[in-house]
Amino acid sequence: MTQGAAQIAADVRSQATSARAVTEEALARIARLNPGLGAFTAVTAERALARADRVDADLATGIDPGPLAGVPFAVKNLFDVAGIATLAGSRINRDLPPARQDAALVSRLEAAGAILVGALNMGEYAYDFTGENAHDGPSRNPHAPDHMSGGSSGGSGSAVAAGMVPFALCSDTNGSIRVPASLCGLFGLKPTYGRLSRARTFPFVSSLDHLGPVARSTQDLALAYDAMRGHDAADPASAEIDAPALAPELESGIAGLRIGTLGGYFASSARPEAFEAVTRVAAALGARQTVELPDVAAARGAAYLITMAEGAALHMDRLRERHADFDPDVRDRLLAGAMIPGAWVAKAQKLRRHWRERVLSYFEKHDLLLAPATPCRAPRIGERTMVLDGKEMAVRPNLGIFTQPISFIGLPVVCVPVWTQGETLPIGVQIIAPPWREDLAIRAARHLELAGAVRAPVAGEA
Amino acid sequence: MDPEKFDADTMIDAMASFLDLTIEADYREGVKAHLEAARVIAVDVLAYPTDDDAEPAPVYRA
């Protein structure tokens, strides 16, 4: 399953191959690779093969199965999948009844011909940047299996980088699409807050939760997004706003785009490779200006506090009644979050609106802004601390120091994977656009891909 | 805020009682570390100037 979604769909639609053959190949690859990588927590083989047969039957009778015909995909296990419990990475949710209906985005992808092959490992309740899980074991980085996949959508990163599926769905509250994309060397799209429906997914921090795909090409990212876009009344945060397709924009190039590189906060507290990656991307995009946003540490702090408090509020009953069943790392943060004063959270939400207005003013002079995605390449599994700028910091909360301030104000981001000479692990760069302008970010990502500045090979083919 | 004036243990005991939460001895240190980290992070947040009529963004619109 090392082909991309676009190629698979073209081959299935032209009947050069069948959806069943593609699905069987994906299931065989998952069976072979997953025991060593821990990406999947459930494989929906029976459902997938039935769905594949339906796609093939449609094609045989002249019915168009859609632009993702026969393309296997998988979802972080906080997406509802009819017939299985929505774990959200937890032990506690194993006691829930099976979901009765698929998540909205799963339904939309299957309506476009895609085939769900399973649910993916993740950090417990999405409060994680490592991809480790106390109950299911870690999802591993296919490029170096003793290293982290990144979290919390670790299984999504692992499955796509290993070529088990061409794309996977993730959630991103503070960086959980972009951190695994960076550590596993993938393209990741975190759309604007309110862009993609969160209906029938297990929440974390509803005022910060986003959903989106990771893939190995910009074309596949666009295909997946295009099939999922559009308002959904079942998600109260879903925006009633036009959602143009991205695929037609891919080849529009970057002529006329004003691109800046974020300095200040985004140019400190990271290892040199994070800045080297940004420099390389900036050079390939012709970005010469440095832009310094104000008060980024305060903005990140506000996101941090809102996350602690809202996360704790969501899990309060479980913290009271099932505290021994949590992943200890998650439980301790949530318990602390339960004790945070309401005044801090109210202040953080005021800061959020105010800071958003200030940051949006920078887009009057720039169309896109660049920043590192993570402060380092994938740490080793189990590593608890890292040294950045001579200061020892905890790995788990700080892999997201560059992603957290951006999602805090809902800006769309395409994360692109950079490989430097001789390196066995990649690192990502965020291409940040104004609200609702995912098209600008993906055009720049596509330009970089065509220029060879970024790439997302299947592990083993790097 | 003066870090010297913060006694995490006293707060944990009071809030655990107030919220009917159990804090077992083996994870008290973890909770304490996160509370102390939050208090450091809150300094920048609380120092950020906002007017009395500043609107919060609980349901955020990008």
Image (cartoon, coloured by chain):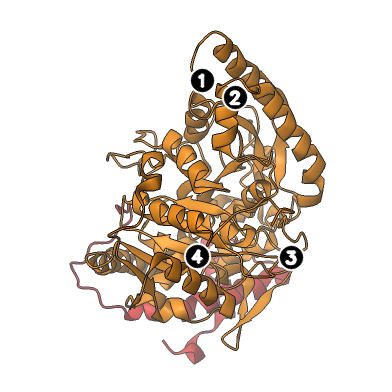
The answer to which quarter of the image holds residue A44 is top right
Q: Which mark is residue A429?
A: 4
Q: The C terminus of chain A appears in which quarter of the rendering? A: bottom right
Q: Nearer the viewer, mark 4 or mark 2?
A: 2
**Amino acid of disc 3:** Ile
**Circle 1 chain:** A
Q: Of discs 1 and 3, which sits in the foreground? A: 1
Q: Is residue A10 left or right of residue A243?
A: right
Q: What's the chain of the residue with tag 2?
A: A
Direction front: furthest residue: A451
Residue neighbourhood size for the residue with mark 1, other residues' Cα within 10 Å, grouped as few (<14), some (14–19), many (≥20): many
Q: Mark 2 points at which residue?
A: A12
- For numbered disc 2, what is the local secondary structure? helix
Q: Do labels 1 and 3 share a chain?
A: yes
Residue A211 left/right relative to B46: right
Alpha-carbon distance for marks 1 and 2? Answer: 10 Å
